[in-house]
Image: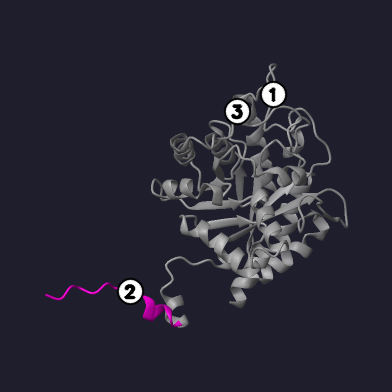
Amino acid sequence: MTAFPVVRMRRIRQNATIRDMLAEVTLEPRHLILPIFVCPGEGEARAIPSFPGISHWSVDMLPEIAGPAIENGVKAFLLFGLPTYKDEDGTSAFDAGQPVQRALGFLRESYPDTFLIADTCMCEYTDHGHCGHLSADGSVDNDATLELLSKAAVSQAKAGAHMVAPSDMMDGRVAAIRDALDREGFSGTGIMSYAAKHASAFYGPFRDAAGSAPSFGDRRGYQLPPMNPREIIRDALLDADEGADILIVKPAVPYLDIASKLRARTDLPMAGYIVSGEYMLLHSAISAGALERSRGLLEYHTAVRRAGCDLVITYFATELAGLLRRN
């Protein structure tokens, strides 16, 4: 009796055309979102020393970063801002004259086909660097912070954001923001929630870029513990129940198991955020000659898609889109 032969794909893999046709997971420019750091002033394109290759951009200089991205097929931007002032409650987060709000209006008018997402948090705007209003004991007051986040989200929607992205990790923030947007007539403005944002060591360069390092303590009281996957999934699904339109897993590759588990539990679109520490790992390996640039970037980012994320937020978006178009 002849045994059934083992089915192999070797003959198919030898042909590049059919190999591409049968690709189970694809990575394309349309899947990429580029983060941009907006700063006050004019004519500003300041390199960030701890974040090589990344800069602060004043609103008038945004075509220098948005233009090449759009030419390569990137159509979505996630905006972070350095305000002109900070105070205890981060009130500059909902000041219409601040860089993020001005950038939203500029990009909306200059590039009407782009999709604009505003990071919604207080840490960039508070003088203490925590993500909300502080109680007398120095802890973040969850409920008081919801009001501040709601004001910021409405301000961003008025300025032109298609979607707001709460990254604070307060309980109930998605429901509060959804209610505030709807009450103010912005029912069409979406919410991309940082649903699985971990208390990670991979955020260092970002905190320099956004000026958001806490002046005391840390954020482990409200960000998610990396060692508790069941808690992480429960927390993310609460955001879905409250009305989030897209869920973010952050960081991306260190938490691909979370992305995969979350994908099995929800049909909502998901994004993986390749954060500043991951960017530096890749940048350093490439600079040292230990990683082939194009293949390394493609493989790393494809892993996020393979884990179940529909979108990838990455500082490499423009370069990666160019590679994908050429290939």
Type of amino acid at the residue the image marks with label 1: Leu
Compare marks 2 and 3 and give the one earlier in the sequence. 2
Q: Position of residue 284 (x, y in %)?
A: 71, 57
**Boundaries of the magenta span:** 1-15
Instruction: Report x, y in % for residue 237.
Output: 45, 39
The residue located at (77%, 41%) in the rendering is 211
At mark 1, the secondary structure is loop
Residue designated by label 2: 8
Q: Which one is in front, 219 or 36? A: 219
Amino acid identity at mark 3: Gly
76 in relation to 193, above or below: below
Q: Position of residue 214 (x, y in %)?
A: 73, 32
Does the CB distance between marks 2 and 1 fall below 8 Å? no
Viewer can see residue 188 = no
* Relative horizontal placement of residue 7, taking residue 223 as reference (left or right): left
Residue visible at 61% across and 45% down in the picture: 165
Q: Position of residue 213 (x, y in %)?
A: 74, 37
Disc 2, SS: loop
**Mark 2 and mark 1: Cα distance apart in space:** 61 Å
Q: Nearer the viewer, mark 1 or mark 3?
A: 3
Callout 3: few (<14), some (14-19), or many (20+) C-alpha neighbours within 10 Å?
A: few
The tag on residue 221 is: 3
Quadrant position of the N terminus in the picture: bottom left
Q: Is residue 307 magenta?
A: no
Query: How many discs appear?
Result: 3
Callout in the foreground (2, 1):
2
**Chief SS of the magenta region:** loop
Question: Which residue occupies 63% across, 23% down?
Answer: 141
The reply to whether the C-beta atoms of the residues labelled 2 and 3 are less than 8 Å apart is no
Examine the rendered structure and indicate whether residue 139 appears above or below residue 240.
above
Q: Earlier in the sequence, mark 2 or mark 1?
A: 2
